[in-house]
Image: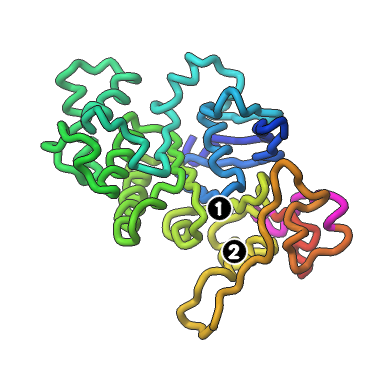
Amino acid sequence: MENSTILEIKDLSVSYTSSNKEIKAVRGLDLAIRQGETLGLVGETGAGKTTTALSVLRILPEVSSSIKSGEIMFEGRDILTLSRKEMREIRGRDIAMIFQDPMTSLDPVMTVGRQIEEMISLHTDCDKKELRSRAEAMLEVVGIRKDRFDDYPHQFSGGMKQRVGIAIALSCNPKLLIADEPTTALDVTIQAQVLNLMNQLKEKYRTAMILITHDLGVVAEICSSVAIMYAGQIVEYGSIEQIYGNHMHPYTEGLFDSIPDIEEEKSELKVIDGLPPDPSALPAGCSFSPRCPYATDRCGESCPDDVQVEPGHIVKCILAGKK
């Protein structure tokens, strides 16, 4: 069905164990994404964004991590209940990921063309000639000449390496693409080119996408909805128009206030006081309350419920709609 929900995460909680401490990386997370939608997952480093993505792909480190609760429903199936073999079939074919650092996500001793071929061969029965043809076509789709098929990653710039990563991720036409800060390691000009390319390919293939970032400018360029994440929880969720035009959570307000405005004369940027909480020793009540300018005694006593301030716009704050 067009625009049907392709991924739904329900009450997901993920913890890591380090030095006999439980680090609560994701706590009671609920999220849904529809076919063709681009969701921006925004938050500071350590908010739990990448852990959420790795949970969807079931590639969390087995020794140190554990999924405490929740369901991850992909096309009606809970992927947390699937076997390893079933998950290997889904990864790359149905759900693909573009990793943060193109310098380390590619195999340095394998040609870029062979790396694209490898992904295609895992999920199709192409013969050798067709395999090469499809891999060359994917290179050209992302703006790389096919005669560079036999080149190695070190022969490409950072932006071109990221294009190769996009080609690998899209080579099997996945239904869901997860992009984990795909432009962080690139300069501003190349960032714009890569984002434009991702947007074009998403529209072409009708792929749903989760874009993980801390850059609200990038989200404005490419996303249709936004989830603001703090200390392992979604604290505000809504459409681009709702979040950018009427954000209500104090943390979201702080993120927007910290963006420089070229039309205003200011001697210094406004920042959010304090630091994110230690995930192994979270404060009682609202996790943001120690840094919140609007905090009351009640905020430190109990974790706030989600408040729907308008259809599709959800805020985890007792002051939602009251400030």
What percent of the width, then of the height, locates residue 1? Answer: 49, 34
Q: Residues within 10 Å of mark 2 (few under 14, many from 20)?
A: some
Secondary structure under tag 1 reads strand
Furthest residue toward left: 147
Please name whichever residue, 181 or 217, is drawn nearer the observer in this view of the structure. 181
What percent of the width, then of the height, locates residue 18? Answer: 66, 33
Q: Could you tell whether 87 is left or right of 148 in the image?
A: right
Residue drawn at the location 76% of the way across and 44% of the way down = 281
Task: Please tell me whether residue 304 belongs to the stretch shown in magenta.
Answer: yes
Vertical relation: 291 (above or below) 163: below
Q: Residues within 10 Å of mark 1 (few under 14, many from 20)?
A: many
Residue drawn at the location 43% of the way across and 19% of the way down = 89
Residue stretch rendered in magenta on the structure: 299-314
Secondary structure under tag 2 reads helix
Please name whichever residue, 201 or 115, is drawn nearer the observer in this view of the structure. 115
Q: Are marks 1 and 2 in contact (CB under 8 Å)?
A: yes
What percent of the width, then of the height, locates residue 204? Answer: 32, 43
Task: Quote the CA–CA distance across marks 1 and 2.
Answer: 10 Å
Task: Please tell me whether residue 110 belongs to the stretch shown in magenta.
Answer: no
Residue for badge 1: 42
Q: Amino acid at mark 2?
A: Leu
Residue drawn at the location 65% of the way across and 66% of the way down = 272
Please name whichever residue, 33 or 116, is drawn nearer the observer in this view of the structure. 116
Residue for badge 2: 255
